Image (cartoon, grey):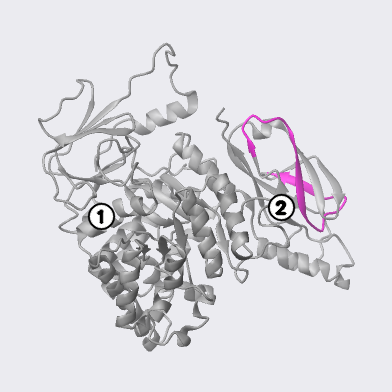
Amino acid sequence: MRRIACCAVVFCLFSIFGTPALDWGQAPEAAVLVIEGGTRIDGNGGQPVSDSLIIVRGNKIETVSRKGQASYPAGAKVLQADGKFIIPGLMDAHVHYAYYMAELMLNNGVTSIFEVGGGGELSLAIREAVNKGKIAGPRVFLAVGSIAGARIAEVGGRSPLEGPLTSRVVAQGADGARQVVKRFIDAGADMIKVHRGPTAEAYRAAAEEAHKVGLPVVAQPLGPTVYAREAVLAGADILEHSAGVEYSVAKDPSKWQGWGNIEAHSLSPVPYADMDEAKATELIQLMVQRNVALEPDFVCKGRGIFTSDEMKGKYELQDYRLLSDPAVAYIPERQRIKWLRNYVEFDDLPAAEQAQRRQGLRNMMRFIAQFAKAGGKVLAGTDTPGWAVAGLGLHHELEMMVEAGLTPMQVITAATRNTAEAFRILDRLGTVEAGKLADLVVLNANPLQDISNSQKIEWVIQDGQVIDRTYHPWFKPPLRASGVESLNWYSALKKQTMNQDPTWAFGWPPPGIEAISPRIVKEGDPALTLTIKGVNFVIKSLVYFDGQPVPTQMVSDSELRATIAARLIARPETHAITVKNPEPIQRREWGDGTSNTAHLLVNFRYE
């Protein structure tokens, strides 16, 4: 596959030496990129246009025309696209973003993602860094956090309006929902997410606050009182996983009472096997009338089963080939194993249960096809990283949409215009039109003849730049994590400690970290005092910064303070913070005296 020469070298030189000095007496002239020839499929669903001409100036599309109908500067960079097909940059409408996804997304033509899970301060930092060209990655549109029911989230007595932003925040009633939404808006949310558990009143209040400022509401209504129909009536704009539909259209809802309370069931297509056709038609009419979009996640709901062994084998092989490439060894091993294990997750189910699961998936596909036929907006998403390989999984989702009964044109629209419209960014992205940001994918084969041709990519253009589509084994963005890992382990350790088990008598107890403060600093900040809260801290506890001890002061058995030198936070990076107690260590089942890991994030300085 062709590559744009020297792109990676130039990127590296700029990273090391900085960008060239500019003459501030006049603004530099924006570079011009021309895509000459090819067939344009603009994302609006209309007739493709042959002999296309697209002129990009800077990061925006300036002209959309046909060959010979518009002129461009002699020095413009020209991509000859005769025989190729041009579509908008692809969008994944359901992502839980992690640093190792950047190349996987971009190399597969995914130029925008919607982080619907939250991500808190880390995702805010990544979004800003991508938007300002500091790191590579898809455009990030962000929920910041989500409003949850008490049965799936805990706040530990802390007010949801205080402390660090978290992925799930319990809101008490309508007033609590309004307060949490306002906090997310103030933090810079691009959407408001309501998770399963809240009441209809909380849903309604959240939607009202979001809509006041023009933000969409993404919902996962899986009970115990709010399902798809109730969420739609409460003002939800997007149903992720098409969640709650299966219960709203069930012949016997009582049969499924409480089913969605179990995490594993929340992603199961089984209840669709009990679909009532009349209820399905009624719900479709309501959603179309209310302009509610559905994001089905077929690749998530169908994992391990799919509609045929042939489809399952094809996707498994594609994933295996990508994940076994040494160039992507930077993907955490546990994540690569998880992605491949998805294909064998249900192999041991009895044949009858597999058949029921497959029937549920078929009914779900049929519902989505009927919804699209009625004029409903379907969005393409994957729920990566849990259930699909980032980037590649979106192409599998597109194929499953065609398998469901959508046309290739409808599927392309689902991954472009529909998603942009549902998330209220259609004024900037989603179609190939003058004035839009220049995110484009150039294909070597016609996706309207075979949607799998969406994988036959020649060029990906993001923000007006042709990206380097090779994978780099050394790929390691500086912004990778924040907060504390293994909090379940910590909670168990704290419970054991609070029980004051008499066998804690000899040696030093194993330490655990609950929180650190600050969690984020900026490059070039002066030396700082880091506060570590947790359990089982002792006079000889030492705080380690990336495996090296730093000056440590014990405040109490639940608080330490560590001095972090300015040189250690001089540049953007993610640093590991641990606490180690000396030998002898009590209770070896809790480890070797080293705590769980917290992360100190050193962000870019933009001012």
Magenta stretch: includes residue 535: yes
Q: Which residues are magenta?
A: 521-545
* Residue 561 versus residue 304 in the image, above or below: above
Q: Which mark is residue 301?
A: none
Q: Circle 1 — which element?
A: helix
Q: Give coordinates of residue 158: x percent, y percent.
A: 72, 58
Which residue is identified by label 1?
Answer: 412
Q: Give coordinates of residue 427: x percent, y percent.
A: 34, 42
In the figure, is residue 493 to the left or right of 136?
Answer: right
- Kindly report which numbered mark, 1 or 2, lies closer to the viewer in this rendering: 1
Q: Give coordinates of residue 318: x percent, y percent.
A: 32, 60
Which residue is identified by label 2?
Answer: 515
Residue 416 visible? The answer is no
Image quarter (top left, top right, bottom left or bottom right) of the C terminus: top right
User: As drawn, which residue projects farthest toward the top?
Assistant: 25
Residue 322 visible? The answer is yes
**Between 280 and 135, the one nearer to me in the picture:** 280
Residue ID at (23%, 21%): 75
Image quarter (top left, top right, bottom left or bottom right) of the N terminus: top left
3D distance between C-alphas at marks 1 and 2: 44 Å
* Residue 314 versus residue 116 in the image, above or below: below
Q: Amino acid at mark 1?
A: Ile
Residue ID at (57%, 45%): 186
Lower sequence index among marks 1 and 2: 1
Q: Amino acid at mark 2?
A: Ala
**Between 10 and 355, the one nearer to me in the picture:** 355
Q: How many residues crowd mark 2 within 10 Å: few (<14), some (14–19), many (20+)?
A: some
